[in-house]
Amino acid sequence: NAGVMQNPRHLVRRRGQEARLRCSPMKGHSHVYWYRQLPEEGLKFMVYLQKENIIDESGMPKERFSAEFPKEGPSILRIQQVVRGDSAAYFCASSPSGQGKYGYTFGSGTRLTVV
Amino acid sequence: QKEVEQNSGPLSVPEGAIASLNCTYSDRVSQSFFWYRQYSGKSPELIMSIYSNGDKEDGRFTAQLNKASQYVSLLIRDSQPSDSATYLCAVNKGRGSTLGRLYFGRGTQLTVWP
C-alpha cells in the first residue's frame, strides 16, 4: 500500500528553466494539496486540487506557478522561469475527502534548488 | 496576525524529561488540531490529532486543547534523543472555502540530549 509518491526527490534547475514536480496520491485518495517549505519556516499552503479541478489556489503566486491534476496520471506542479527564491522543499499531501478533519499524509517532498 | 503561532525554540531537554511544546491559533471556530513531527530533511509525519477540549494520550505523547484560550500543546514524556526533531502545529478551520486546508505554525525545534 504505497503512500503519497513524489518525484523527483531532488531537482536542480538553472534560473529561467522550468521545474515540473509530480505527485501521485495514496490509492483511493482524490484530493491533493501542495505546500512549500522554505528553510526555517513552516509549511505554506499553495493549492488544493481534485481530479480535473482546482478547488483552491489562493496560496499560489499569481505568475509562473500552475498546477493540475488530470483524470489520469499524477498531479503536476509547474514552475516556469524559475528564480533563486523558488528554492524550497515542495510537499504534496493527499486525503480521501476534501475535509482536513483527519489531517493529511505527506509525500517525501521534492527539494528544488535553483542555481 | 498569523493563523498559527509557535515558539520557534530551540527547546532543549535532557533525556527522560518532559518536553512541552505550545501553539496558539487565531480563528476561534477552528475545529481540528494536529501535531506533526519533522526530522531534518524529511517530510512531516502526523503524530497526534485532537478535536475536543481536554487531553488526549497516545503512548508517551499527550495533546492538550483549550478552545477558550485558543491554545494547543504537546507533552512528550520520558523524552528520548530520537524525539529530536521539529514539531509543527497545524489547525483546520473545518468550514467554507478552506475546508480542506491545514494552517501550519513555523515549528518548534526540540533537542533531547543524552
Image: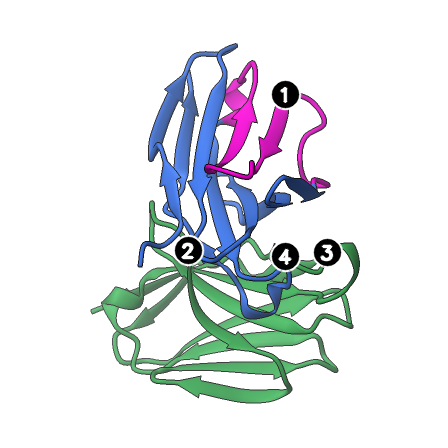
> Which is the main secondary structure of the residues drawn in magenta?
loop
Colour mode? Answer: by chain
Same chain assignment for discs 3 and 1: no
Q: Secondary structure at mark 3?
A: helix
Is residue B72 a member of the stretch shown in magenta?
no
Q: Secondary structure at mark 2?
A: loop
Question: Pointer 2: what residue?
Answer: A27
Residue B70 position (above or below residue A30): below
Gap in angstroms between the C-alphas marked 3 and 2: 24 Å
The local crowd at label 4, few if under 14, some if 14 to 19, many if 20 or more residues have their Cα within 10 Å, is many
The local crowd at label 1, few if under 14, some if 14 to 19, many if 20 or more residues have their Cα within 10 Å, is few
Q: Position of residue B37 (x, y in %)?
A: 41, 62
Same chain assignment for discs 2 and 1: yes
Foreground mark, 1 or 4, reads 1
Foreground mark, 2 or 4, reads 2
Residue plotted at (52% across, 74% down): B49
What quarter of the picture does the C terminus of chain B occupy? bottom left
Chain letter, colour green: B
What quarter of the picture does the N terminus of chain B occupy? bottom right
